[in-house]
Amino acid sequence: MWTRQHKQRNTGRLIIPSLCVAFLAYFGFHAYHGEFGIYSKYRLEAEAVDLQGKLDAVKAGRLDLQRRVQLMHQGTLEKDMLDEQARKALNVSHADEITIMLPATAR
């Protein structure tokens, strides 16, 4: 008759719990840091706030341009203002005119 001469090992009892811990750690990490995780949600919300600010700036610029275009409609058009704006945009002047250059911050 054969007899066992070794002790029972407790490592067999730790295999299943350690695999469960590794499994939960892996999926827990990716639930927080993954592409669709919690941290990504906060980054996307911050980016949405930033893009909303840019959109508001573009809308304000558009309204300014619409206001300036409205000034050029028939009946409200002033020839002096049109001449001044054209000269400013094209950077030209007549030979008999005096040009005063202002710094960019004074405009």
Image (cartoon, helix red, strand yellow):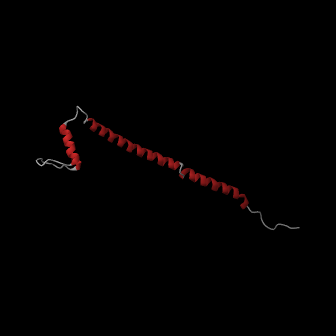
Looking at the rendered structure, the number of numbered marks drawn on it comes to 0
Q: Nearer the viewer, residue 84 or 40?
A: 84
Residue 63 in which image quadrant: top left
Q: Nearer the viewer, residue 3 or 20?
A: 20
Q: Position of residue 74 (x, y in %)?
A: 24, 33
Q: Nearer the viewer, residue 98 or 74?
A: 74
Residue sitting farthest toward the left:
96
Q: Residue at x 66, y 54 (%)?
A: 20
- Whether residue 107 appears in this view of the structure is no
Is 8 rendered above or below residue 105? below
Q: Position of residue 76 (x, y in %)?
A: 23, 33
Apparent side of residue 53 relative to residue 38 in the rendered image (left or right): left
- Whether residue 17 appears in this view of the structure is yes
Is 61 rendered above or below residue 103? above
Q: Residue at x 59, y 52 (%)?
A: 28
Apparent side of residue 23 relative to residue 8 in the rendered image (left or right): left
Q: Residue at x 32, y 42 (%)?
A: 61
Q: Position of residue 1 (x, y in %)?
A: 89, 67
Q: Residue at x 41, y 43 (%)?
A: 52
Q: Quadrant of the C terminus?
A: top left
